[in-house]
Image: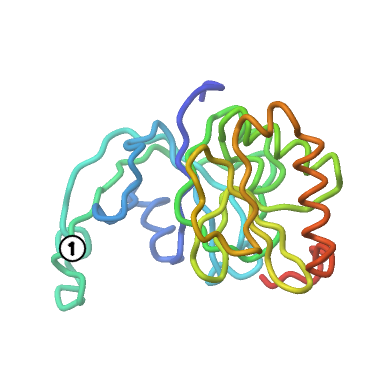
């Protein structure tokens, strides 16, 4: 894997699917929900609750050696009566599964879909947020939040399912941060909006506004209190 290799972080919900990836060397992604950045050079797997002690972390990855379209019935012929039997999937043909030097955990439960990252970030990340590849301004904000000791999540979703660039879980409800040149009409008070120009030219002022909003929402919730 090269530092600039494309790596798709994909959700692995089922130990059976992991067994297929390990023993049959394939993994499926529904065509209708496949990310735009497709196909990647590598895929890494984020384990969910059914994996017990290994859940909520990335530990395994594999090279993508090809892909094809197939129905679920074709992929899993032993389940012809499944409600999604005719759903079309991308079947990723995989090389051997390889283990990372250390697992990459999520510090809190989050609704993860797909993350496109790079080989360099995959091997240098210590938690899920380190995998996110953002714009120059998003990366500036991320570093500033970390240096200020503000424990944020990147590319997450508020309880109302609104996607935000940064999410700060607070004691009186989540605070979202959106970085965009697009006007934010009727934005709720718990979503702060900054333009790339504000971040480049007045980052300290942006941080002041964020800290004021956090104070109004009872402070940032400690990681130990966040639900997994």
- Expressed as whole percent of the image width and height from the top left, the position of residue 134 reads 56, 35
The image quarter containing residue 146 is top right
Q: Which residue is mark 1?
A: 87
Drawn side of residue 69 relative to residue 128, left or right: left
Q: How is the image coloured?
A: rainbow
Who is closer to the viewer here, 54 or 130?
130
Q: Please give the name of the residue rendered at 76% of the width and 74% of the height, measured from the top-left corner.
A: 172
Residue 195 as seen in the image, left or right of residue 142: left
- Nearest the viewer among 70 and 213 is 213
Left or right position of 222 against 25: right
The residue depicted at 76 percent of the width and 34 percent of the height is: 203
Where the C terminus falls, by quadrant? bottom right
SS at mark 1 in the image: loop
Q: Is residue 158 above or below residue 67?
A: below
Please determine whether, in this image, residue 209 is positioned above or below residue 111. Answer: above
Q: Residue at x 81, y 62 (%)?
A: 220
Q: How many marks?
A: 1
Instruction: Please provide percent x and percent y for residue 114.
Output: 45, 49
Q: Residue at x 66, y 41 (%)?
A: 130
Quarter occupied by residue 199: top right
Image: 207 above or below 108: above
Looking at the picture, how far across and down is residue 192, in whole percent?
65, 53
Give the image location of residue 138, x and y in percent: 62, 36
- Whether residue 125 sits left or right of residue 112 in the image: it is right
- Front residue (pair 172, 228): 172
Q: Residues within 10 Å of mark 1 (few under 14, many from 20)?
A: some
């Amino acid at each position: 894997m090269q530092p600039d290799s494309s790596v798709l972080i994909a959700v692995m919900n089922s130990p059976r699917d992991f067994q297929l990836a390990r023993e049959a060397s394939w993994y499926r992604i529904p065509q209708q929900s496949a990310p735009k950045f497709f196909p990647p050079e590598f895929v890494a797997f984020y384990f969910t609750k059914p994996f017990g002690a290994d859940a909520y972390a990335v530990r395994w990855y594999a090279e993508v050696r090809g892909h094809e379209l197939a129905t679920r019935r074709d992929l899993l012929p032993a389940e012809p009566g499944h409600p999604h039997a005719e759903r079309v999937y991308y079947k990723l043909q995989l090389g051997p599964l390889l283990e990372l030097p250390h697992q990459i955990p999520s510090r809190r439960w989050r609704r993860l879909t797909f993350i496109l990252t790079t080989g360099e970030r995959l091997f240098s990340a210590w938690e899920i947020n380190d995998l996110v590849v953002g714009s120059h301004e998003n990366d500036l904000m991320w570093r500033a939040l970390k240096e200020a000791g503000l424990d944020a999540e990147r590319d997450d979703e508020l309880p109302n399912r609104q996607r935000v660039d940064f999410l700060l879980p607070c004691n009186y409800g989540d605070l979202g941060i959106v970085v965009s040149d697009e006007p934010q009409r009727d934005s709720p008070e718990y979503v702060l909006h900054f333009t790339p120009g504000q971040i480049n030219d007045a980052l300290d002022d942006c941080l002041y506004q964020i800290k004021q909003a956090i104070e109004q929402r009872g402070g940032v919730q400690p990681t130990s209190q966040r639900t997994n």
